[in-house]
Image: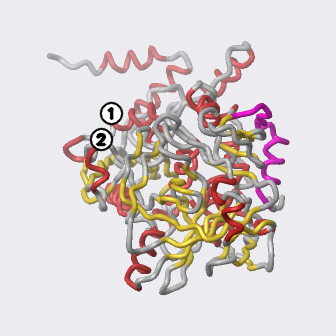
Amino acid sequence: MPYYKDLREHIRVLEEHGKLQRINREINKDTELMPLVRWQFRGGIPDSERKAFLFQNVTDVKGKKYNGQVLVASHAGSRDIYAMAMNTTPQDIVKKWEEAQLHPIKPKLVASGPCQEEVHLGNNLLEHGALEEFAVPISTPGFDNAPYFSAGNYVSKDPGTGARNVGNYRTMIKSPTRMGVCARTYQHIRQQWFKYKKQGKPMPVAISVGPTPNVGLVAVTKVPYGVDEFDVAGGIAGEPIELVKCQTVDLEVPATSEIVIEGEVPTDYLELEGPFGEFTGYMGMPDPGLFVNVKCITHRKQPIWNAYISQFPPSESSLMTQIGEEAAHYNLLKHDLGIDNVVDVAFHLESGGRMLCVVVLQNATTSQAWQALYGVCSRTANLSKITIAVDDDIDPRDMDSVFWALCYRMQPHRDIHIAQGKTAALDPSAIPAAGHGSLTEPPATSSLLIDATRKWGYPPTSLPRREFMENALELWQDLGLPPLKPKVPWFGSSLGFWPEEIAEEAELALRGEHYKTGEKLAKNRIKV
């Protein structure tokens, strides 16, 4: 199936699959919109039943009505929705990411595109309201100090090499033509900003809102510096992303974007930006940040404002981050570091999709386990506070399974390392919230590395053997008992230590001949 030509086709497919909720009644973008979607994540609705929301009648606290719609949770409202954004199945998400990174496709420049159906610059920019033209919602009403972009895809270039970067950075609306940007020193756009600063020049940027979903997925995924995210997006689509030249800056943006904002980032000043509800589940406090002076806005007729719902986990952004981090770290360990027996990498939604990582290894030696653990820790953008290596009979996404491994395959004095030198600016345990606004560098933090793999042969898992559990499953279903969701491990298997004599005794029991074992044991009594 060909990839989506634009966001609107993606919306149509979501609706065809029962994954879109249209809201036709009047909704206030500042006080009602995001709280309504929030209940989908805080109201006990299972992942499989969550939907994207399309708001078609939007107002604000001043009673203004907007000529456009607002789309939320369209990229990762659920794992099914995420798979649809990649044009694949939930089972093949990791494989699709691996292929996209190994086989990127360069974008194609075209002469024109729908994103420039309307062009507003100069006096015409303010006449149309500039940023006020769009229904940008307040994400955390009562705590956020402004409407923020949550799905703005920033395009910028390295002034020396011309290498392009596409990244998603939260954006505070400060005036109709000025926006604050939260970009940490380790993030790629900030690295490019430092280079422009050395040259004494402002940094040109373009922000694409509402491109095809593959662009949004790569923008929140940390690919290596110098790798063009548009190339990886092309790999996801299986075809080149079509780009058009901007009107006022020397940059290219997706031709079918709903909205494009062009501007410059000064390099001689910073402004406080924040607070904003963050993926940690706490408010991110104000920090000195970049800001954008808007020069031009182009958009489609009746544009759709695309937003992610982030803040308290689980959320759309934590799922996007989780899957993107899993794909990036799997590629790092298996293909960049050559750890061939890596089976899976799992980040956890409760941690915002970043802070808790479990790496699955097959038949790992102790040295391979530590190579994988330090490999995860070495990634510049990695924020994982706890990284655990487990065997391939452990389900890395089920913490019951992971804690079982921690309890019986790990000794704290032997199998735990603490790696220092990490940074996590939004982690409230790193520094008191009152200290954030004065910092230009995030505080140093640490990462807990745990080898919870088996170090030698273990006795079998104390569960019935697979054939007996499978037979019992058929019996369960025949009896019409409630549907099951099997938890790993759900059957017993050999883990390297099971003497042949004991295995034979178990077979005797299955034939009803356990008395033979009793007779043998009687002959071998131990006198005390």
Give the numbered dot on residue 407: 1
Asked if 124 appears above or below 329 in the picture, the reply is below
x and y percentages locating residue 7 in the rendered image: 76, 55
x and y percentages locating residue 151 in the rendered image: 60, 54
SS for callout 1:
helix
x and y percentages locating residue 167 in the rendered image: 55, 64
Asked if 501 appears above or below 452 in the picture, the reply is above
Asked if one can make out residue 387 in the rendered structure from this viewpoint, the answer is: no
Q: Quadrant of residue 24?
A: top right
At 71% across and 37% down in the image, what residue appears?
51
Which one is in front, 9 or 106? 9
Q: Quadrant of residue 382?
A: bottom left
Which one is in front, 21 or 23? 23
Which one is in front, 2 or 345? 2
Asked if 398 appears above or below 482 in the picture, the reply is below
Read off the residue under disc 2: 410
Does residue 455 appear left or right of residue 167 in this picture?
A: left
**Magenta-highlighted residues:** 6-27
At 70% across and 76% down in the image, what residue appears?
107
SS for callout 2:
loop
At 62% across and 70% down in the image, what residue appears?
262
The type of residue carrying mark 2 is Met
**Which quadrant is the C terminus positioned in?**
top left
Q: Quadrant of residue 118?
A: bottom right
In space, the residues marked 2 and 1 are separated at their CA atoms by 6 Å
**Which quadrant is the N terminus positioned in?**
bottom right
Which one is in front, 426 or 411? 426
| Labelled pair 2, 1 in contact (Cβ < 8 Å) | yes
Based on the picture, tell me whether residue 305 belongs to the magenta stretch. Answer: no
